[in-house]
Image: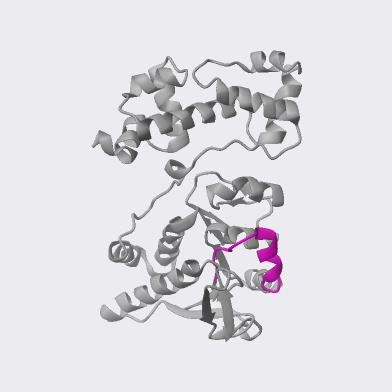
Amino acid sequence: MKQVAILALNDAVSASVADPCIMMNGVNDFLKNAGKPPAFKIHLVGLKRAVKLYNGFFTVHADSLLADMKKVDLIIIPALGGDMKTSIKKNAAFIPWIIKQYKKGADVASLCVGAFLLASTGLLNGKECSTHWLMATEFREMFPEVKLVDGRVVTEQNGLYSSGGATSYWNLLLHLVEKYAGRDMAIMASKVYALEIDRKSQSPFIMFNGQKEHVDGPIREAQNYIESMVSERISVGELALRFAIGRRHFERRFKKATNNTPVEYIQRVKIEAAKKHFETSRKNVNEVMYDVGYSDTKAFRTMFKKITGLSPLDYKNKYNMQAN
């Protein structure tokens, strides 16, 4: 039986504390009904017995104190609430314990923006990680040594697990159930909790909003220009000339300021505009393609699927009620 420590973090998002308990207790019940022993011994671990979650709206009662937990097999870090730097400080006492348990052989899994606390341990340095797409820029600024993977729902490296945003952490929980209790239990859990098993990407949910919280004025002007000219074809050379910056220097500055190359930024802006058209209009794929400055159908479809994980038609059918 695996010893699982679900951390009752100060100001954690309450659902991300409760949901792992629900999933793993449920799997234990499935096994019991099949005449098999339980897979998990679940501990709700806090720095004190009563822990306030989500700005004090909820209180949970930890059944174990951190100081009493000597050896566990799996640590689950819930999503943090509020300002990330403040929340990390409030939960700093967990960090050395997480590091110690990992070195003893425990797996560590962060749910959604729980990745910020996991990254604070230093264990993710040089490794890949997932988190909520909305927090990607802040995560990269705080943890430049971590390789944040945009769009991925579940990331696993060397016993360190992380998930994409919001409810996509249920897919990480299914992944952990499969590892510890078998594929049959993961399938059972996916059916009971109505979850799509093996979902790989959160790309369809990502809304691109170019990073502009930087101090490079000319690059911000270039971003605004790209966004105002979404229906036109724009080259990097044209942008460099317009803003009187050498092309190579322009590309370096743009990447440093926005975390995207100029070409990537142009593509993301155009595809985001296309998504809005598909969500709100009756236009067909070719009409939208021309509206956002593409003339090659294959190139448009390829780029749209690369960024969103869906074909243009599948995206329109999924998000536009008028299309159904």
Relative placement, left or right, of 46 versus 169 is: right
Front in this rendered view, residue 128 or 285: 285
Determine which quarter of the picture holds residue 249: top right
Q: Is residue 149 left or right of residue 249?
A: left
Q: Nearer the viewer, residue 126 or 113?
A: 113
Task: State the residue at coordinates (53%, 37%).
Answer: 208
The answer, for residue 303, to whether it is visible in the render is yes
User: Residue 216 location in percent, x, y?
Assistant: 75, 32
Looking at the picture, tell me which residue is in the foreground, 12 or 97.
12
Question: In the image, 314: left or right of 255?
Answer: left
Which residues fall within the magenta stretch? 75-94
Q: Can residue 92 be found in the magenta stretch?
A: yes
Q: Is residue 311 visible?
A: no
297 in magenta: no
At 46% across and 21% down in the image, what residue appears?
292
Instruction: Where is residue 71? Give x, y as percent.
Output: 60, 80
Give the percent coordinates (x, y) of residue 128. Answer: 60, 50
Name the image quarter holding residue 122.
bottom right
The picture places residue 211, in percent across and down from the top left corner, at 63, 38
* Residue 176 sits above or below residue 323 on the image: below
In-image side of 236 versus 33 (left or right): right
Which of 27/284 is in front? 284
